[in-house]
Image (spheres, helix red, strand yellow):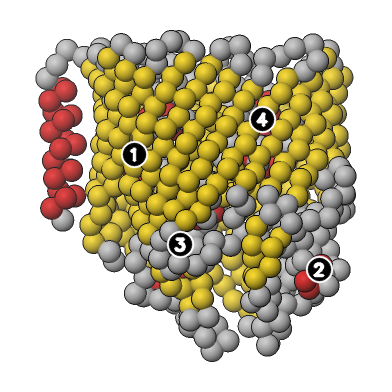
Amino acid sequence: MKCLMSLFTFVWLSQFAFSQENLATIEISDFSPSLMGFVNSPVWQTSEQELSETPFVQDVLMQAPGVVFTQTGGPGSRGALFLRGSESRHTLFTIDGLRLNDPSNTDRHFDTAFLFSNQYQDVQLQRGPSPVLYGGDATSGVIELTPRRGPRLNEDPLAQVNLTVGSFDTFLVSGQSDWKNKKHQGTFGLMTYKTEGYSRLNSKRSHSKEKDGARSTQLFQASRHQWSQRLQTDLYLQGSLSQVEQDGFDNSGNAIDTSFDRSENQNVQFIQTTSYKGDFALSWLKTGINHIERDIQTLSQGNEFYHGEIRQLQLGQQVLSGKHLTVAGLNIDQENYSDKKLNASNDIFSAFLQQKWSLDKLSFFVGARGESHQRYGEFLAYESSFQLQPRSELSTYIKYAQGYKAPSLYQLFGPDSFGSPVGNPELDPELNRSLEWGVGWSGRFVADLILFQQDFQNLITFTNQGYANRGTLRVQGIETNLLSPEHFWGQLRMNFGILDFSKYRQVPLRRPPSYGSLSWLWNQDKWSTELGVRYVAGRFDNDFEGKRQKLSAYELLNARVRYSRNLNQDIILMIGNLSDRQYEDVWGYAVAERNFSLTLSQRF
């Protein structure tokens, strides 16, 4: 408890010291706190315009630098993002700071399948670990979702209806409406979605022919309440009910193609953030709940249920003194998991402090987070970085960070399956030590180049004896990102990554040594066109008999055409896998063949 108490003392003494000075007033027109604004490595951000061009957030994220995206099947099937050669569970998803990673899942990863884009005003991706501000789940990166809360400044309230039809009997209808009343405003929305999808099991390995169906209905409300010039409350409430048909396994553990197996998922998220803007500081109190229930019916094990919940309480403060910025906070998190045989929970208490000093063209960041974990005791995460900006367009930085990720409750205590062990209460937390250097240019064109190294220890994998720590893994890589100026012929957007794996005890599977995307965008009057290709290099995997095989490299060509009839109506045509490429995804499963969708968007 000593390291945690020391950090508590440091946090609050530093705030007391600042309060004795004559500090500058923080000028913030929208003072909703977001820790993403204080991270010390590159942040990639999308916009409402980009989000409006596709029903799914994952379609935008797969174009982000450093990302390998995979979906085990067609629409509605499990979607996951892998950053810099790490596992999907090492990427943290948040909305207004609430952790969205699924505690009812085996490894607490986040499934992007039913993450619809119409309720968000922007999505930000922080490449690289952020253990100080976000904790253990942010081992390799953070994706922060910001919901739309009514009209922006000087804009009128907007109502919008979207209708999408497409391949695999896909149908999606969504509607949202802004509201505004004096100092209160918000957005309310409803959407329903269905598709027949495509079997998640690989047709080459499993002779799969079935098209798996999916259904989802979601309701959300996001609002902002300005009680005074200094006091504000942001609210967010979302509920969803989804059903996914799954290929499963028979009583002998063999993969089969059947319409019997299915999963029903229910999810409720609620978060409130109350902020107070003083003359020298911004303080906030954040509370949130992420509750998930998954009821699964299978041939092999009958009816099963998995329930998970994350409860979060955060007290934070931002203080600005000249060119010295401090962000500090206290966190209480509780994770719950239950199924037919298990009911378990974890409590985590933490305190974090990050400071920034700016001296002309040089900035220095340093931060630490002390955690007291119910099962693993105390852990200290820390990071530091230098940033130099010799010109307004040019900047460079170097960053070091150390963090850890505790095993999920299922990895620790999961019940036996088919007579074989699953959970392992002797698991150790996964560790990550990261070092990166980057240089960026932001002028007529935007570009960056990043060299990074991640050293993982105690990585967790599933074996025939259940979950186990498999040892070490070093990932070294290069990332590039480029956005060209707009010309009469259009605009280019490119990112590319190269990875090298070493110091491993088991061969890393399903990790491509290179990946990237290239897009051409063209805007002319009422027309907007995008043609893009994603590339994933060959990688290794084990087949269903446990034999090593190499999966071929692949590239996917996608196209989008948008026609705006007027300021209030858009027609969007999207074509996925334009060349009807036959390939095996990162996880070795079959994915959607060539597919089409047509969206009509009407604003009022």
Q: Earlier in the sequence, mark 3 or mark 4?
A: 4
Q: Secondary structure at mark 3?
A: loop
Residue depth check, mark 1 versus mark 3: number of the one nearer the observer: 3
In space, the residues marked 2 and 3 are separated at their CA atoms by 30 Å
Residue depth check, mark 2 versus mark 3: number of the one nearer the observer: 3
| Mark 1 crowdedness (10 Å alpha carbons): few <14, some 14-19, many ≥20 | many
Residue on which disc 3 sits: 504
| Mark 4 crowdedness (10 Å alpha carbons): few <14, some 14-19, many ≥20 | many
Q: Earlier in the sequence, mark 1 or mark 3?
A: 1
| Mark 2 crowdedness (10 Å alpha carbons): few <14, some 14-19, many ≥20 | few
Name which residue type carries label 3.
Answer: Tyr
| Mark 3 crowdedness (10 Å alpha carbons): few <14, some 14-19, many ≥20 | some
Name which residue type carries label 1.
Answer: Tyr
Residue on which disc 4 sits: 494
Name which residue type carries label 4.
Answer: Met
Q: Position of residue 9 (x, y in %)?
A: 13, 41
Q: Quadrant of the N terminus?
A: bottom left
Q: Secondary structure at mark 4?
A: strand
In space, the residues marked 3 and 4 are separated at their CA atoms by 31 Å
Q: Earlier in the sequence, mark 4 or mark 2?
A: 2
Residue on which disc 1 sits: 400
Q: Identify the image quadrant of residue 426.
A: bottom left
Q: Residue at x 79, y 64 (%)?
A: 199
Residue on which disc 2 sits: 204
Q: Quadrant of the C terminus?
A: top right
User: In front here: 403 or 413?
Assistant: 403
